[in-house]
Image (cartoon, rainbow, N blue to C red):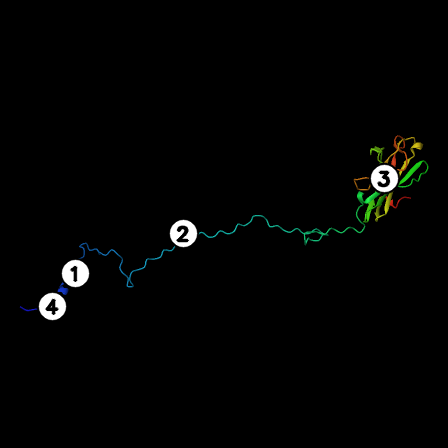
């Protein structure tokens, strides 16, 4: 009996086992299909899964822009001629004309001057005096009406004597006058009354001034009862 060394027997056993395994691998599973269901290994090891690219619908919504106002833009209005554009919230007033503006009732005083009678005619100057601190102007006819103590009017409004109106410039303290004339009622036979005052309205004004009446009875109705007024002239009378 020949004894084989132990190392040699172990090597022969390994060779036999390897041959058996190779035979089984060659036979497969009998259907010709590969039994490996997983993906083949790459030369660099296990393949990393591919990254998915996010679709546009999955991205975050874009930030909305700020709303735009629909109101129209305001444009600065130009300053009117003769005024200064406001720098501190105020606007300079237009300059007063060199001749001054119209005199107002509140700037005047009315009075009746001395009678200058002639041929049955009574002639009184009606005077308007500038009591303000500025120069102003008067032009045309004043209004006039006789009133009793209760303020009721006596007779009709005076008629205007034809004349050419002129602009009268009155400085502070100066005056303009208009002639008030009527026929003496004792001569004309007109019905008469004694006024308590004469109301005088400056041209282009609405508020009257009250002046004391020193002339006695005046005609208020009947024949030759008309009272007349002339245009204003510089001064206090003839």
Q: For this view, does 91 lie left or right of residue 33?
A: right
Image depth: mark 4 or mark 1 in front: 4
Residue 222 spot, x, y in % from top left = 88, 30
**Which secondary structure, mark 3?**
strand
Q: For this view, does 218 lie left or right of residue 2?
A: right
Tell whether label 1 touches label 2 (CB within 8 Å): no
> Which residue, given by chain and number where applicable, does mark 3 sit on?
211
Q: CA distance from mark 2 to mark 1?
A: 53 Å
> Which residue, given by chain and number where applicable, does mark 1 sit on?
21
Tally of numbered discs? 4
Image depth: mark 2 or mark 3 in front: 3
Residue 58 tag number: 2
> Which residue, given by chain and number where applicable, does mark 4 sit on?
6
Mark with earlier residue (3, 1): 1
Residue 163 spot, x, y in % from top left = 86, 42
Q: CA distance from mark 4 to mark 1?
A: 23 Å
Q: Residues within 10 Å of mark 3 (few under 14, many from 20)?
A: some
Mark with earlier residue (4, 2): 4
Mark with earlier residue (4, 1): 4
Q: CA distance from mark 4 to mark 3?
A: 164 Å
- In which quadrant of the rendered image does the N terminus lie? bottom left
Q: Residues within 10 Å of mark 2 (few under 14, many from 20)?
A: few
**Which secondary structure, mark 4?**
helix
Would you identify the image quadrant in which residue 204 lies?
top right
């Amino acid at each position: 009996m020949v004894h084989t060394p132990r190392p040699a027997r172990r090597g022969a056993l390994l060779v036999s086992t390897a041959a058996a395994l190779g035979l089984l691998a060659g036979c497969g599973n009998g259907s010709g299909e590969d039994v490996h269901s997983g993906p083949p290994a790459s030369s660099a090891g296990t393949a990393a899964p591919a990254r998915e690219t996010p679709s546009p619908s999955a991205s975050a919504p874009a930030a909305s822009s700020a709303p735009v106002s629909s109101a129209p833009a305001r444009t600065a209005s130009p300053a009117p001629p003769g005024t200064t554009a406001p720098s501190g919230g105020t606007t300079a007033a237009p300059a007063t004309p060199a001749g001054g503006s119209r005199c107002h009732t509140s700037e005047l005083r009315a009075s009746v001057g001395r009678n200058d009678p002639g041929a049955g005619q009574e002639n009184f100057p009606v005077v308007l005096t500038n009591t303000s601190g500025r120069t102003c102007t008067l032009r045309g006819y004043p209004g006039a009406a006789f009133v009793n103590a209760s303020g009721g009017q006596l007779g009709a409004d005076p008629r205007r004597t034809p004349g050419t109106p002129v602009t009268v410039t009155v400085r502070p303290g100066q005056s303009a006058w208009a002639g008030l004339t009527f026929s003496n009622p004792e001569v004309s036979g007109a019905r008469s009354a004694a006024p308590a005052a004469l109301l005088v309205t400056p041209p282009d004004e609405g508020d009257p001034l009250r002046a004391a009446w020193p002339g006695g009875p005046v005609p208020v109705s009947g024949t030759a009862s008309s009272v007349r007024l002339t245009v204003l002239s510089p001064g206090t009378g003839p």
